[in-house]
Image: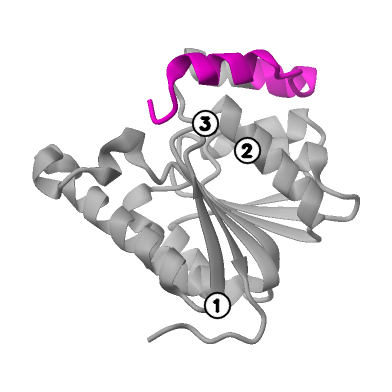
Amino acid sequence: MIVEERITTYINSLDIGNSNFLNQLRRQALLEEIPIIRQEAEHLLKVLIQLKQPKSILEVGTAVGYSALLMSEVMPKGCYITTIEKYEKRIPVAKENFRLAGKEEEITLLEGDAFEILEQLEGSYDLIFMDAAKGQYIHFLPAVMRLLSSGGVLISDNVLQDGEIIESRYCVTRRNRTIHSRMRDYLYELTHRKDLETSILPIGDGMTVSVKITGNEEKK
C-alpha cells in the first residue's frame, strides 16, 4: 500500500457508487481478478473529467470497458471516447458491456497494438487516460503528446508500482526491473518537459495528472 490501508478504507467507505450497471461490472471484474482502476483512483478521474469538460477522450487500455464506461457517466453531452485494446479475449467482453450500457454511440473501441494505433491516429483529444502495459508508457508518450490538445489533460494510472518505484532496481525482482526502469524514465519525462505541468499523486497505485502547456517547447 502506498497510503495507509485504514485511510484508503475510510475514503472508499464514503463512496456513493456509480450506476447499477457499473457497480455490478466492478464486482464482476474483481471476482474474476480482471485489473480495473482502483476505487479511490476512480474518484479523482471523475472529478478531473468534470473539471476539464472534455469534448473528446482517448483511453489507452480498455480491458472490459470499466473505465471507459465510468468516464462516459460523467463526461459532458456531446463528448466521445476512443479506447484501445489489444487483448483479444477482452475485446468482445468490452464491446458487449458498451452495448448493454447503451454507450455504443459514445464509445469507439479500436482493436490492436496501442503503439501502432496511436501512430496512425489523427486529430486531438482534450483528455487522455493511460492505463495499459506500464512498461510501454514511455514508448507511447511521443504519440500521446502529439494527440493531446493544448491545455489538454494526460492522466496516467498505476505509476508507483505499489511503492516499488522508490527502490533501487536491484531491490526489485529481476522480472520487474525493465518495467521499473521504464516507469522511472516515464515519470522523469513527465516532470521535466517544459510543455507539461505534472503532479504525481499517491492515490490508488499512483496517478499522474499532466496538463499540456500552450506555447512551450519540450526541454531538450
Q: Measured from the top left, where is residue 28 in percent x and y?
A: 57, 16
Q: Residues within 10 Å of mark 3 (few under 14, many from 20)?
A: some
> Which of the image's four quarters has the C terminus?
bottom left
Q: Residues within 10 Å of mark 1 (few under 14, many from 20)?
A: many
Q: Amino acid at mark 3?
A: Ile
Q: Earlier in the sequence, mark 3 or mark 1?
A: 3
Q: Earlier in the sequence, mark 2 or mark 3?
A: 3
Q: Name the residue that disc number 1 marks.
A: 195
Residue 27, numbered circle: none
- Given residues 185 and 71, the one toward you in this image is 185
Residue 36, numbered circle: 3
Q: Amino acid at mark 2?
A: Ser
Q: Name the residue that disc number 2 marks.
A: 67
Dots 2 and 3: beta carbons under 8 Å? yes
- Work out how far the residue at label 2 is from the one at label 1, CA to CA, in angstroms: 27 Å
Q: Quadrant of residue 142?
A: bottom left
Asked whether, in this view, residue 72 is left or right of residue 202, the answer is right
Asked whether, in this view, residue 13 is left or right of residue 137, the answer is right
Which region is colored magenta? 1-25
Asked whether, in this view, residue 40 is left or right of residue 160, the answer is right
- Work out how far the residue at label 2 is from the one at label 3, CA to CA, in angstroms: 7 Å
**Which residue is found at the position 50% from the left and 79% from the top?**
194
